[in-house]
């Protein structure tokens, strides 16, 4: 039980700190910031607990179990966050309709909302801020980091048979 409580404490503390930090200033590369934050918060909590004499006595097996719970939850959360970082057309429609309460909204207004929210320029900006592409003088180039991720996704799509003939 202590393993679950400690893993939950690490995650909850990381999450609350993320909320505070995101209110102060939204990072350019949000998913990377999440991964770093969720990596360092348990380390800082552990060091502080030992420094102030509040650290529970855990066996090596319990420490491994905490990691086995915490790491996948953190990775799943970061993947979920990345998926929500860019709104899908379906989510935009539902969100807009939910925001209009019972009245609904005109189809033309909804289409205009989608057109403005799904601007491709915004996606270019996110890719550039993440360091995956570079835009100079009207030219869009992939960075070495972007190429690395592109190759990883290409490899994964071949492994899982997501490409034609794959």
Image: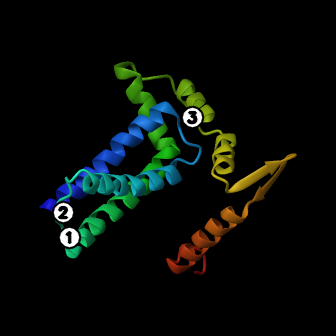
Q: How is the image coloured?
A: rainbow
Please say if the residues under marks 2 and 1 sit with CB atoms less than 8 Å apart: yes
In the drawing, what numbered circle is on residue 62? 1
User: In what quadrant of the picture does the N terminus appear?
Assistant: bottom left
| 2 or 3: mark nearer the eye | 2
Image location (x, y in percent) of residue 132 = 67, 57
Relative side of 85 to 155, left or right: left
Compare residues 111 and 59 and report the one nearer the observer.
Answer: 59
Identify the residue at horizontal 65%, vertical 47% (top origin): 129
Q: Of marks 2 and 3, which one's residue comes earlier in the chain?
A: 2
Image location (x, y in percent) of residue 38 = 40, 54
Relative side of 166 to 140, left or right: left
Query: Is there any visible trace of residue 146 in the rendered image?
Result: yes
Relative side of 63 to 153, left or right: left
User: In what quadrant of the picture does the C terminus appear?
Assistant: bottom right
Query: Is there any visible trace of residue 88 in the rendered image?
Result: no
Residue under label 3, please give it. Answer: 114
Residue that lies at the very extreme toward the left in this rendered image = 1
Residue that lies at the very extreme toward the right in this rendered image = 137
Q: Of marks 2 and 1, which one's residue comes earlier in the chain?
A: 2
- Packing grade of label 2 (10 A; few <14, some 14-19, many >=20) is some
Residue under label 2, please give it. Answer: 3
Image location (x, y in percent) of residue 22 = 46, 37
| 3 or 1: mark nearer the eye | 1
Which quadrant would residue 17 be assigned to in this image?
Answer: top left
């Amino acid at each position: 039980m202590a393993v679950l409580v400690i893993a939950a404490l690490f995650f909850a503390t990381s999450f609350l700190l993320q909320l505070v930090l995101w209110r102060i200033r939204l990072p350019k590369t949000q998913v990377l910031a999440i991964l770093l934050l969720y990596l360092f918060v348990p380390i800082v909590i552990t060091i502080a607990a030992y420094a102030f004499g509040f650290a529970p006595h855990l066996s090596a097996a319990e420490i491994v179990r905490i990691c086995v719970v915490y790491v996948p939850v953190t990775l799943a959360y970061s993947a979920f966050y990345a998926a929500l970082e860019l709104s899908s057309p379906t989510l935009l429609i539902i969100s807009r309709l939910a925001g209009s309460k019972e009245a609904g909204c005109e189809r033309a207004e909804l289409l205009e909302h989608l057109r403005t929210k799904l601007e491709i320029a915004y996606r270019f900006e996110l890719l550039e801020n993440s360091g995956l592409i570079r835009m100079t003088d009207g030219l869009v180039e992939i960075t070495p980091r972007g190429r690395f991720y592109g190759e990883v996704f290409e490899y994964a799509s071949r492994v899982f048979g997501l490409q034609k003939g794959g």
